[in-house]
Amino acid sequence: MPLLFSFFLFVYLYISSSLFFDIVHFCLHQWSSSRYEALRWLSRCHQFHHLYYNRSLNFNSRYRWQNSWFALPLEAACLCIGGLLGWFFLMLLPVIEQKHVLRTPLIAILAVHIIRTSVVIYMSGQDSNHVVYKTVPKDPSWLFVGPQFHALHHVHPDRYMGSVVKVFDWLAGTAYSLRNKSVVITGGSGALGSAIIRRLRSEGVRNVYSLKFGEHWTHGDFNRVGPIFDHLEPDILILAHGTKGEDAMDANCNSTIRLIQLYLEQRAGRTPASATKTLPEVWYIGSEVELHPAFGGAEMYRYLDSKRAFLPYARALYDDSGVVYRHIVPAAFQSRMGRAIVSADWAAGVMMWWIRRGARYVPVTYTGFAYSNFFKFFCSRNTIDGVPVDSARVRPDRSGIGVGRQRHGASSSSDVCRINPAL
């Protein structure tokens, strides 16, 4: 057998074994209330793993023995069975002659799983995927599972099931959890904002608070926002407000940046007792006008300029290791801002479909522009006229040099947004 073929077969068996384990892993969390004793017993064996490396992301030595001799052998058995099933599947394919599918890669993958499990047992279950975190760092990979992603599974045991790749979580919609999170949203009375609130509640968030323009904040006054953030301690800030009016630049860019600053300032100032295991999240509702020309009169040009003016700051936040930033790009939907062929509820549903699969760039489109805009957004630089936009200009600078660095807000938004000809 050619060496290259053996290598690809080994990789195939490794992935197939991990995907089989991911499926069983998901089932193990469902079987805790099964009517069958055998399934409940298997679920309990796996629960020892979660009792050992618990939701606080600490190791509880009380369950070290059970983790080593019940949970880890169960995992190894599932991986080996998955490898065998993947090998048998290849053997059944008529296009592959059985004599070319040798047993050496299968024996190698079984040996890898057994040896790896033995080493992890020797290490008392404290391997590279199980790390003590005060706050889970930002996941650096969109495909592969690392310690950050797996730590989130221990915080939210019904989500983040992947062991090697995130394919199962993409298919099942388990790559993200909103359960018990606190959310603050702007534009909550609008068509999309109210649809998002309904979706959030169906996902099991702890609470949703709507920041109202004119009541809680204006373009010139943010003094009431800081105390609200201090009281609610939100996990997520969703910026769903917007306008095509004369104040489009203030509403869609300047005020947006100031609200983000205040939110991240509050998160940075939390005491250890109130700190959460997850990073702060910011969701921004962009637009396909980030890519295509303005179709319409002067109001559409104002809207285009304001949305594109925010993009360098969006890109800075997207790359920031201390913030989970989601850039949501919807096509036109039915609202007070204009007519469209789809409803705001449809847009909110598509948005949540992507987010449940871990998307940080979220295309909500029936035109296809949002997919094309991904390449523009991903390849864009966080610069204006060649000058880098540091994320510290958007989020608070701990040295005190950031824009508008005043506790509970300066009296007005920072006029940092302007038309960027490069966009």
Image (cartoon, rainbow, N blue to C red):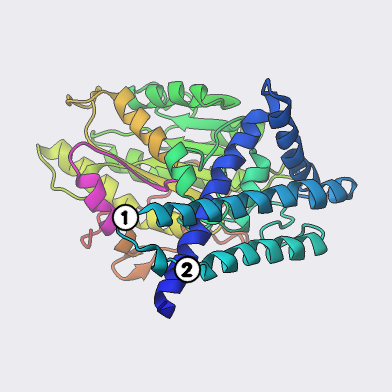
Observer able to see residue 373: yes
Q: Secondary structure at mark 1?
A: loop
Which mark is drawn over residue 369?
none
Q: Quadrant of the N terminus?
A: bottom left
Q: Residue furthest bottom?
A: 3
Residue type at tag 2: Leu
| Residue drawn where x is 20% and y is 46% of the image | 369
* Residue stretch in magenta: 358-376
**With 365 as the anchor, is 176 left or right in this view?**
right
Query: Can the viewer see residue 394?
Result: no
Tell me if residue 360 is in the magenta stretch: yes
Closer-to-camera residue (242/237): 237
Q: Which mark is residue 94?
A: 1
- Above/below status of 294 relative to 194: below
Q: Is residue 84 left or right of residue 361?
A: right
Looking at the image, is 212 positioned above or below residue 43?
Answer: above
CA gap, disc 1 and disc 2: 15 Å
Residue behind mark 2? 102
